Structures are given as C-alpha cells and as structure tokens.
Image (cartoon, helix red, strand yellow):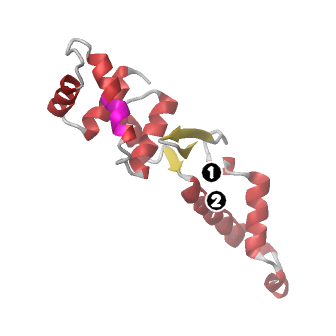
Amino acid sequence: MTTENMLSVVLEFSSANDMLDDCIGEGMMVDSLSSCIEWMYEKILEEDSLDNEEEGVIALMQHLDEDYYECKTYIEKGKYLVYTDDSLEEAMYNFYKSLYDDIEMPNIPTNMQSYIDIDAWIKDKIREEGSDILASYDGNTIEKIVNGSYYYLFKQ
C-alpha cells in the first residue's frame, strides 16, 4: 500500500498533531515522514479499535490501491459489497432464499411445495455456486485479510 493511502487511514483515525507527537515520542526523525506514517498506520491496525466496516474499507484499499475516502465512497455507493465470514453466509443465504421464492417456487406445483426442504436446497446452491454469484460485475470473489479477519469483496 502506498504511503499516501496509509496517510489517508492515519488521518481518518488520528489527528496530524497526535501522529507527529507519537512519532517523535518513538524517537523517529521528523524528516522521515513516510516511516512515521507507516508506523502510525500499523499502530492503528494493531490497536484493534477498528470495526468491521472500517476494516472492510481497508480491505478494499488493499485491492484497489486507492485512498480511504475513495474506497469508502465506492462501498457507500454500492460499487463494491464487502462482507466478513458471518455476513457473507447471511448474504448468500438471503440471495438464494430470494431466488427460490421468486423463481423456483412459482414453477413447483402447489401440492408438491410442502415436500421441498428449502434450507437444504439453499445449502446445496451455496455449495454448488459459491459466493461468486454476489459479484454481479465480473463474478469474482476477492479475498483480503485485515487484522487477521477475512473480508470478501464483490464488484457490482
């Protein structure tokens, strides 16, 4: 990740004065600004104070090599979907449940519908199709790790 992109994260979660005070307190030379920015970026990640949404933005930054604000805007505008392990399972379940309700169910005779195990059908679809179905743009799941947590990115 570029120094400029790391700086966008540092400035999102820390003031510039705090950043410089911390770097000087660590004995870093002020003329080594890129080292200071990198150190602050790592410190922010290590503090484990970021929530899943913020870490999701950082995961997208890793993929696109864009700054924090640009990636946050992509997510807010729906250009990318970002999920954790738990939220991905829920999103896939909801997608296939909707698919079943809207497309499959109307094609099944009414007297046969009660014999179908919808949850088993959904689990089979998830196993067969995977999560790539959520990436409407290119059908690819992008996997990134931030602070030891997996994030799944889907371009829309």
Q: Nearer the viewer, residue 120 or 6?
A: 6
* Secondary element at tag 2: helix
Please, which residue is most extreme toward the top here? 31
Find residue 94 and report its horizontal and vertical position in percent: 61, 65
132 w.r.t. 17: above or below: below
Residue 49 on image: x %, y %? 34, 48
Q: Is residue 97 left or right of residue 34?
A: right
The answer for how far apart the CA atoms under marks 2 and 1 are is: 8 Å
Residue at x 35%, y 24% (from the top left corner)? 38
In the drawing, what numbered circle is on residue 92?
A: 2
Is residue 138 shown in magenta? no
**Which residue does the image show at 75% across and 65% down from the upper left?**
123
Relative height, residue 30 to residue 13 (above, below): above
Front-most of residues 154 and 100:
154
Question: Of callouts 2 and 1, which one flags the residue occurring earlier in the amino acid sequence?
Answer: 2
Specify whether 118 is left or right of 62: right
Q: Which residue is mark 1?
A: 134
Quarter of the image for the C terminus: give it. Answer: top right
Q: Residue at x 37, y 27 (%)?
A: 5
Along the line of sight, the residue nearer the viewer: 15 or 117:
15
Callout 2–callout 1 Cβ contact below 8 Å: yes
Label 1 element class = helix
- Residue 147 numbered mark, or none: none
Q: Which residues are magenta?
A: 40-44
Camera-near label (2 vs 1) is: 2
